[in-house]
Amino acid sequence: MNREQKTALVESLKDDFKNSQASFLVGYKGLSVNQMQTLRRAVRAKGGKLKIAKNRLVKRAVSEVDGVCALQEQLKEQLGVVFAADEFTQVAKVLSDFSKNNPALSLVAGCLEAELIDKAKISQLAMLPSRDVLLSQLAGTLQAPTTKFAALLNTMVIRLLWTLKQVGDKKQ
């Protein structure tokens, strides 16, 4: 790899760090090529991106981006960087599930909105529902009082009609 290619790779990594909501460091030592391709496809399907580069180049990119400098301490051994642009919970779920099925993949650390997160927090992120599910739960919660009030009014009308019917039956 010549100097221009390294510079281009560092710029690409900096752009990915800037444009992603979350980034995760994963150890991939011991994974086969087929397993890596499967992981790349799964991450890409959820809107993420897996990049493999030398730690020296990743450190250079991290040092030039604000908010991810805490990742420099974690850059040891063979690590890949997974970027999540939109649905970081779904990308974390893919990584967590893949690491359970393939023990060679290890979750090292991550950076979520300029905060360093460890392996346990990545697993917690993986358990969160997707954005669409959370939005639908919020909509249901906001709609619940109105729905219950409408049901209460409907019940009152039904009771009034039932009472009037009872009075009418007694008069006959």
Image (cartoon, rainbow, N blue to C red):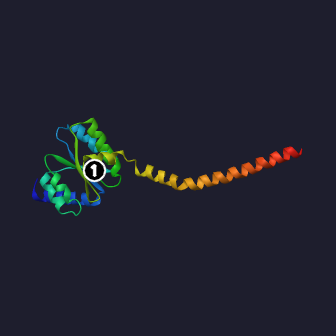
Task: Using the image, determine if residue 62 lies above or below residue 158.
Answer: below
Percent x, y for residue 71? Answer: 19, 55
Q: Position of residue 164 (x, y in %)?
A: 80, 49
**Residue shown at 34% from the left, 49% from the top:** 89
Is residue 159 rendered to the left or right of residue 152?
Answer: right
Dividing the picture into quadrants, the one containing residue 27 is top left
Residue sitting at x 59%, y 53% = 147
State which quadrant residue 172 falls in: top right
Residue 168 in percent (x, y) is at: 85, 47
User: Residue at the right extreme?
Assistant: 172
Instruction: Please state if 25 lies on the left or on the right of 142 as rendered.
Output: left
Residue identifier under label 1? 49
Q: Which residue lies furthest to the left in this view?
A: 2
Which is nearer the eye, 25 or 34?
Answer: 25
Pinpoint residue 30: horizontal percent, then vertical percent. Answer: 17, 38
In this rendered view, identify the residue nearer to me: 7 or 137.
Answer: 137
Label 1, secondary structure: give it.
Answer: strand
- Residue 41 visible to an observer of this rendering: no
Q: Which residue is drawn at 55% across and 55% down?
A: 143
